[in-house]
Image: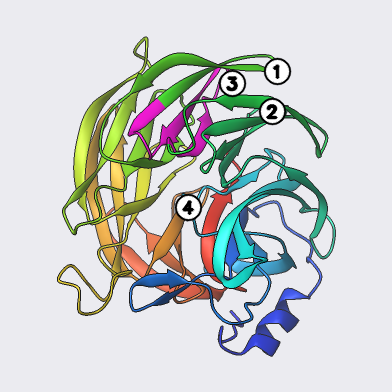
Amino acid sequence: MKTCNWRSARLCFALAALPLFSIGAAAQILVSANDNKAVLANGVNVVPDNPAADTVSIIDLGVSPPKLLGEVKAPASVVGPPQSVAISGDESFALVTGAFKVDPADPKKAVPDNKLSVIDLKVRPPAVIDTVEAGLGAAGVSINNAGTLALVANRSEGTVSVFTIAGNKLTPAGKIQLGDSKSGPSHVAFTPDGKSALVTRDGDHRVSILSVDGNKVEDSKKFMVGGVRPYSLEISSKGDVAVVTNQGGGQGDIDVINVIDLKANPPRIVNTVSVGQTPEGVGMSLDGKYVAITVMNGSNRAKDHPAFNDFGLLQIYSVNGTDLTKVAETKVGHWCQGAAFSKDNKTVVVQCMVEKNLQAFDFDGRDLKPVGTVPLGGGGAGLRSAAK
């Protein structure tokens, strides 16, 4: 595969400007949201001088190693879980949130934003066709399987925004107030039948259950409490389980992921697995057989911090009912975010903020073997493929 060094900006953006080539039947569209206004400086997230615009990369995950198809400028943010991207079931458009922007009054600070970009994936090159407003700190976003509703978790105002969808046109349909501005709704995901949704709340350690009836979405007032700071969330395509990462207290302690039994009424947390320092992202295979977890492992800390490690971790677990069994683990880059599986489960990718790339691995059910990288036009902050 022809690649470019991410430091060679001219070459990277020349590649990004290429038309979106014809996509074969085996293609699987993967979308990466890339943040250029956040860099690590001795373990601290800072705004660099004169940051480049954020970008969104369109990638074919149906080949190994994955292939960059195109790139477009759009607001993105590493603040919030890496499910800041959603793709329609027919892979015709994507939604990307931008939780933070550079403060107009102080270019060295970032402040909450509310942007939700609609990106046409069928045109060549891909293009932003609409920008709508969600809520402050717009973070996790999901589209229901019917393609008629989208939900956005607004981390800085304690709400979830509701949008109706017609084709690729989004129309605001209200907000759900879950808690105060510190409750921190981080990600929201629909169950496969579209009748409910789960919302992680890293500010008050809850996972809320929303009821969905047509275009009507309400807080059921039911919730679960598992680990500290529930964050990323994935629901199995079978609708039987969900997996939640918990950010923990940030002291270097071992943190956990939770398994939710969705067949229970109401759903409840039935299993907890220790995974290491700060599980960030979770990606479930399309058949529900595997779960990938990205673990910070202290890679985002200052080098003199006692909990620092010079690498992150990618962990793969097999799913048997509500039981998870670790089957593979490998070292990855620094401050890594989202993870995703190819449709056949033979390729697993993880995006890393510091390296500004997508790292790809062959997976045979037992081992992970590196097969290459894809350069990104910024720090990889959000990652999703279509749910079906």
Q: Residues within 10 Å of mark 1 (few under 14, many from 20)?
A: some
Separation of residues labelled 3 and 4 (CA atoms): 22 Å
Separation of residues labelled 3 and 1 (CA atoms): 10 Å
Mark sitting earlier along the chain (3/2)? 2
Which quadrant would the N terminus be assigned to in this image? bottom right
Q: Give amino acid for label 1.
A: Asn
Instruction: Name the residue tied to disc 3.
Output: 194
Q: Which residues are magenta?
A: 183-207
Q: Is 206 covered by the magenta stretch? A: yes
Residue 149 is tagged as 2
Mark 3 lies on a secondary structure that is loop
Query: Is label 3 or label 4 in front?
Result: 3
Separation of residues labelled 1 and 4 (CA atoms): 29 Å
Query: Is label 3 or label 2 in front?
Result: 2
Q: Residue at x 64, y 32 (%)?
A: 161
Question: Quadrant of the rendered structure where residue 190 is?
Answer: top right
Q: Give amino acid for label 4.
A: Ala
Q: Give amino acid for label 2.
A: Leu
Instruction: Name the residue tied to disc 1.
Output: 215
Which quadrant would the C terminus be assigned to in this image? top right
Q: Residue at x 29, y 42 (%)?
A: 318
Residue 158 spot, x, y in % from top left: 51, 34
Q: Residues within 10 Å of mark 4 (few under 14, many from 20)?
A: many
Residue 190: tell me if it is visible: yes
Residue 340 is tagged as 4
Q: Give amino acid for label 3.
A: Gly
Compared to 17, does 168 lie above or below? above
